[in-house]
Amino acid sequence: MKIIRVGVDLAKSVFQVHGVDRYEKVVWRKKLSRAEWLSALLETIEPGC
């Protein structure tokens, strides 16, 4: 699973985050709080995504 693009839907307290592979298939989807979304993103994606 190599994520090439990440989408973030920003809201007041909960963020919807998803990542797609090179075939535009969603391979990662999470509902995260404002406090945890950045650390989860950094743990999941590779540099240069």
Image (spheres, rainbow, N blue to C red):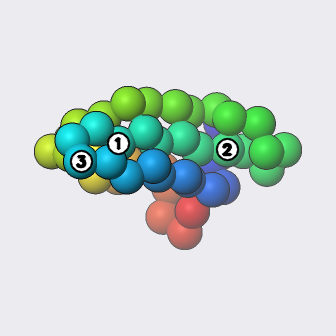
**Residue 39 position (above or below residue 47):** above
Residue sitting at x 28%, y 52%:
38
The residue lying at 58 percent from left, 44 percent from top is 19
Number of other residues with Cα within 10 Å of mark 2, as a class: few under 14, some 14 to 19, many 20 or more: some
Amino acid identity at mark 3: Lys
Residue denoted by label 3:
12
Residue with the mark numbered 1: 15
Image coordinates for residue 17, horizontal then vertical, percent:
46, 42
Q: Residue at x 32, y 48 (%)?
A: 11
Q: CA distance from mark 2 to mark 1?
A: 17 Å
Q: The C terminus lies in which quarter of the figure?
A: bottom right
Residue type at tag 1: Phe
Tell me if I can see residue 46 in this picture. Answer: yes
Which residue is farthest left? 35
Q: Nearer the viewer, mark 2 or mark 1?
A: 1
Residue highlighted by disc 2: 20
Residue at 15% across / 45% down in the picture? Answer: 35
Return the x and y of residue 43 as percentages of the image width and height. 35, 45
* Residue 29 location (% of width, % of height): 52, 31
Callout 2 amino acid? Val
Q: Name the foreground residue: 33 vs 43.
A: 33
Q: Quadrant of residue 30?
A: top left
Task: Specify whether 20 is left or right of 24.
Answer: left
Give the position of the N terminus as an image quadrant. Answer: top right
Measured in 3D between alpha carbons, the distance from the residue under mark 3 to the one under mark 2, in whole angstroms, is 24 Å
- Badge 3 marks a residue whose secondary structure is loop
Q: Do callouts 3 and 2 mark residues in contact (Cβ within 8 Å)?
A: no
Q: Residue reaching furthest bottom?
A: 48
User: How crowded is the residue under tag 1: few (<14 C-alpha within 10 Å), some, or many (20+)?
Assistant: some
For the residue labelled by badge 2, is the local secondary structure a helix, a strand or a loop?
Answer: strand
